[in-house]
Image: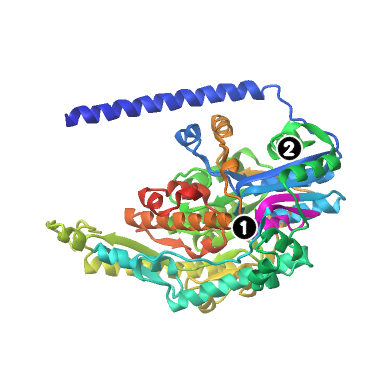
Amino acid sequence: MKFLGTFWRILVGIKDFLVLSLLALFFLAISAALSSGKVAKVPDGGALVIALEGAIVDQGSESSPFDAASGNVASEVQVRDLVRAIDAAAADKRIKALVLELDGFMGAGQANIDSVVAALERFKKAGKPIHAWATAYTDDSWLLAAPATRIWANPLGGAIITGPGGSNLYFAGALAKLNIDVNVFRVGTYKSFVEPYTRASASPEAKAANQALADSLWQSWLSEARRLRPKADVPAYIAQLPQRLGRFGGDGARAALDAGLVDQLGSRDEFDAAMVKLVGEDDLADWGHYAGVNLDDYLNAIGGQQKSTGDAVGVVYVTGSIVDGEAPRGTAGSATIRAALEEALDEHPEIKALVVRVDSGGGSVTASEEIRSALLAAKADGLPVVASFGPVAASGGYWVGTAADEIYAQPSTITGSIGVFAILPSFPRALNNLGINADGVKTTPYSGEPDVLAGLSPEVKQVLQMGVEDIYRRFLGVVSTARKLPLAEVDRIAQGRVWSGVEAQKLKLVDKFGTLDAAVAAAAAKGGIKGDARVIDIEKPVPEWMKALQSFSKSDASEQQARDPWARLMQASRLRLAMAVQDMGRMASGRSATMQAACVECAIAGTPQLAAAQQSETWLARLLLPQSSR
């Protein structure tokens, strides 16, 4: 009977695979039929409608055919696509206004928000209005809406600004009850990635460093808020929130209007009517009755306007966790990035300079070094390299950035975290409690090691700690050479500590503040390119069949999104919890046993990892996460 059950499960698996494969082919055929001859319509005098769903990211994550066919796809929009569309619309005589629909927006790293805000300001400088609408605003959505000519909010909504911060999970007590031993090897006073598995709370050193980071990021956020909305006193609004709400009988929308955080209250129908007056009426679309074109269609319409000839700057994307070998988009697989770079340089001799765009909190040491070595090889062939740090470029991400001649960051960039660790669980006590013992023979002290069943031998523990210390010395040397700083000074500012871009520039870990565009311009100048540089993105391409599947698998998530401000904040908490569960799973699987240069603090204000969070929804996540926020 057991054999028949196994055989039946195999048959079901084969059936599911065939069904999904047929679905993939069906969707691809439908997409090809619909897209052939389809020309995106850009109405004269209409609005560019940017209805953001999910997160703003540097590089969209890649879905498996099974996930795509079943609709399990993270909603993401690439920051480069947003900036390109907004800049094109600023000069496009057909576009009269821009509309930001932010109900489905789940956040972004502040550095990427700053890049989009800069593009919105250029659009407004061209004399065109921007109108933003959402039921409720939180930190990211409000800052993104801040440059708008008019910020609208639903009368049932409001604005809740919280500032960076939040709680992490600490598993030491649970691991102790389960009799699981966590073997930690680390260097760096502030290398707190391992603390969730060894402590019941943050160490005083880590907490002080994290508080300093949060305070610096908060000051950067407030500075940008004051610049964009000088009449909105956000600190006073937060400090007096209960009193302000009390003045209006608990009405959050009126309190936000009174504080200058929003300009007008109105339902979606009222907003739609106002936009009809502004840009004219059209057939009913996803966004309403007013004339407009959505982001995807507009990008399709302007696709041919990009420069296709002439000298170019290649932009190498390093996003997500840095891992060894091949990896899908949204994860920085060292072999994938190296192969993409080598292929691009072979196929495009017109590339005269490189920008390495980093949005990563690090990962594998060996993978980080493989990417850095590939960039150094390009430098050895005469190509200048400039680094552009996005929301996060820390630990292994910073290791990669040291290949550059010059490093651009933004005040809100999270960087540094120069430290190394290895972590490996073992289970001798847990097995003993179950009446299971581990025994065997050895020919050397290292036979069968690392032995997660009987526990690591003292010799192996010593060797692993020495290896971590050696990698840390190498890390210090790489930074010292690249940044032209004394080794002792690098050690002082390293120790695994994370810095904001503001502090990192003072410490000479970065050179200048600027967006990706500024880094591209600097690389073009170093490469001797005259005028506006053509840009070639160097990354793993998205297969056409996957584009078709993803386009069909976009669900009605925006209709299911919770929209009141506290529910939106709950979604952010759920995301932090999901990422903590994923880290725990990675540790338990032994995938963190290799030498790691990674940053746990970077989640405080980094890019939301929606795809990674989806993958982490194991039985534990499903048990802990509120079903209403899913």
Say above or below: 175 vs 284. below
| Label 2: how many Cα within 10 Å (few below 14, some 14–19, many 20+) | some
Seen from this angle, which residue lies furthest front? 249
Circle nearer the viewer, 1 or 2: 2
Q: Position of residue 126 (x, y in %)?
A: 86, 50
Say above or below: 536 vs 546. below
Circle nearer the N terminus (1, 2): 2
Question: Which of the 4 quarters of the picture holds residue 187?
Answer: bottom left
Residue bearing the label numbered 2: 288
Q: Position of residue 574 (x, y in %)?
A: 49, 55
Residue closer to the observer: 168 or 255: 255
| Label 1: how many Cα within 10 Å (few below 14, some 14–19, many 20+) | many
Residue 154, magenta (yes or no):
yes
Could one spot residue 385 in this view of the protein? no
Q: Position of residue 300 (x, y in %)?
A: 71, 34
Residue bearing the label numbered 1: 390
Apparent side of residue 405 relative to residue 97 in the rendered image (left or right): left
Quick one: SS at disc 2? Answer: strand
Residue 22, magenta (yes or no):
no
> Quadrant of the image for the N terminus?
top left
Residue at position x 77%, y 64% from top? 229
Say above or below: 432 vs 296. below
Residue at position x 26%, y 65% from top? 177
Question: Which of the 4 quarters of the picture holds residue 263?
Answer: bottom right
Highlighted range, magenta? 132-155
Apparent side of residue 578 relative to residue 276 in the rendered image (left or right): left
Residue closer to the observer: 193 or 538: 193
